[in-house]
Amino acid sequence: MVPAAGVTPVAELEVVTFLQDNVAVGTGLLVDARLPEWFTQGAIPGAVNIPFAAITRKTPIRPKS
C-alpha cells in the first residue's frame, strides 16, 4: 500500500532498526509530527517532536551547527 506518490510506509520493525542503526549513533532523526499534547501522551523513545503545524517551506532541513 502506498498512501501517496513518493511516500513509502514503514512498519514497526523498520522503525526499530532505524532507531538502533541510525538514531542511536547520531546519524538519523525520528520526527514525531503530532501536536505536543498528543506527543506527551506517549511517543517512541528517541523521537523528537516537531509539530506538523510548525513545519513550513522555510523550516530548515538540517539543524544549524
Image (spheres, rainbow, N blue to C red):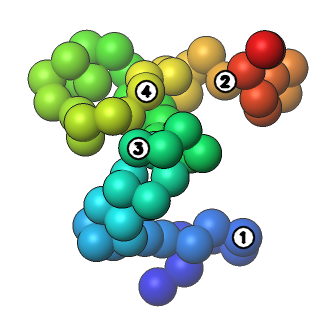
Q: Foreground: 4 or 18? A: 18
Mark 1 vs mark 4, foreground winner is 4
Badge 2 amino acid: Ile
Mark nearer the viewer, 2 or 3: 3
Q: Give the x, y percent position of residue 55.
A: 66, 24
Label 1: few (<14), some (14–19) or many (≥20) C-alpha neighbours in 10 Å: few
Classify 46 as above or below 27: above
The answer to whether mark 2 and mark 3 are in CB contact below 8 A is no
Q: CA distance from mark 4 to mark 2?
A: 13 Å
Quarter of the image with the C terminus in it:
top right
First in sequence, mark 3 or 4: give its number: 3
Q: Which mark is residue 48?
A: 4
Seen at 14% across and 23% down, the residue is: 41
User: Gap between marks 1 and 4, in whole Å?
Assistant: 23 Å
Q: Residue at x 27, y 24 (%)?
A: 39
The answer to whether mark 3 and mark 1 are in CB contact below 8 A is no
Indicate which disc, 1 or 2, sits on the residue closer to the N terminus: 1
* Residue 55 circle label: 2
- Secondary structure type for disc 1: loop
Labelled disc at residue 24: 3
What is the number of the mark on residue 6?
Answer: 1
> What is the residue that sits farthest to the left in this orientation?
41
Image x and y of residue 45, in percent = 24, 36
Q: Secondary structure at mark 2?
A: loop
Query: Which of marks 3 and 2 precedes in the sequence?
Result: 3
42 displayed left or right of 36: left
Out of 13 and 23, give the one closest to the viewer.
23
Amino acid on which disc 1 is placed: Gly
Q: Earlier in the sequence, mark 4 or mark 2?
A: 4
